[in-house]
Image (spheres, rainbow, N blue to C red):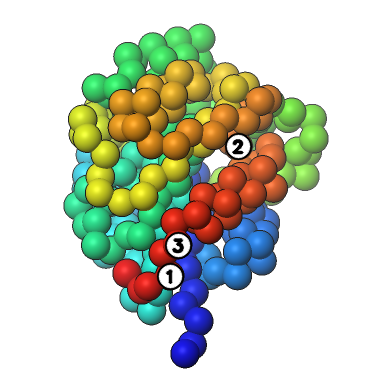
Amino acid sequence: MVPVTVRWVLLRGLTREAAHWGSFGPELAAATGGAVAAIDLPGSGARRGETAPWHVAALAQHCRQALPPHDGPTVLLALSLGAMVAIEWCRQAPGQVAGCVLVNTSAGGHSPFWRRLRPVHYPTVVRMLAGMDTAMREQRILSITSARPQQHAQEVARWIAIARSRPVSAGTAWRQLWAAARYRAPASPPPVPLLVLASAGDRLVDPACSRGLARGWQVPLREHPWAGHDLPLDDPQWVIEQVAQWWGAQGRHAPR
C-alpha cells in the first residue's frame, strides 16, 4: 500500500502572501513527511490582480476553489486573518479538511473588538493603509508582530523586496481589514479536529482571544511563552513540534 501523505495548506493574514512563510513550509514538510501548499488570498501575492472580497466567507470560498486535488488528508495551518478564513473553510466544506490549526486569531462573538486588535495600534494601522514608505511599513509590521525583531533583519529585507515586487493595493488592504473586523465565528466549532496556538507575547492581538476561542469550543490550546503575533516567524520549530504532536495523536491517515 502506498503511504498516504498529509498536505498542509498554509494561510497568512492581512496584506501578507505565500512568500511570507519563508522557510517554514519546507521545515514543516521535512519534519512531518507531508506536502505543503501555501495559498494567497485574493488581492495578494500571485492573486493580486483579483478583487479582494469584503467578507471572510467569500475569501474562504475563493481559497477552496484555488486548492488542487490531493490524494490524502488536507490540514489547514493558518495565522490571524488566514485562520478566520480557515474556520470558514472548515464550516463550508468539512469533508475537504482533515484538521485545522489556528494561530493567533480572533473572532467576533468570542472576543470584544479591543482585544481583537489592540487599540494602541489603531493609528499605526490607519497610517499604513493610508500610505507609508514601503521599507518603513515593513519594518513597522515586524516591530509589531515579532517579539524579537532584532533577530529578523534578513527577513524584513525580504519582506521589503516582496512588497516592492508584488505590492498589495490600498483597496485590498481595506477590504481585508473590513472582513477581519466584521468576522463572527460560529458558536460551535466546525466538525473537524482543531488545535489553537497562541503567543503570550502577542502585541497585536490579545492572546485572550485564542484562549477564549479554545475555551468556548472546548478544543486544545497551546500557548508559547514569549513569541509575538507572527509565531511561525519567531519560533517555527515550536510550532512544528506542537503541530506534529497534535496531528500524530489524531491517528487520521485515510484520505479526505
Please, what is the three-letter code of the amino acid marked with disc 2? Leu
- The quadrant the C terminus occupies is bottom left
- Disc with the residue nearer the chain's start (1 vs 2): 2
Instruction: Say if residue 124 shows up in the picture.
Output: yes
Mark 3 crowd level (few <14, some 14–19, many ≥20, 10 Å Cα): few
Say which quarter of the image contains residue 200.
top right
The percent position of residue 187, horizontal first and vertical second, equals 21, 30
The part of the image, by quadrant, that contains residue 97 is bottom left
Q: Which mark is residue 231?
A: 2
In the rendered structure, are the residues bearing label 3 and label 1 in contact, judged by CB atoms less than 8 Å apart?
yes
Residue flagged by tag 3: what amino acid is it? Gly
Image point (25%, 49%), residue name: 191
Task: State the separation of the CA atoms marked 2 and 3.
Answer: 26 Å
Which one is closest to the eye, mark 2 or mark 3? 3
Kind of element beneath mark 3:
loop
Q: Which residue is mark 1?
A: 253
Direction from residue 194 to residue 151 in the image, left or right: right
Depth check: 191 or 171 in front? 191
Tags 1 and 2 touching, CB below 8 Å = no
Residue at 39 percent across and 68 percent down: it is: 73
Residue situated in front as seen by the camera: 80 or 135: 80
Q: Nearer the viewer, mark 1 or mark 2?
A: 1
Residue tagged 3: 251
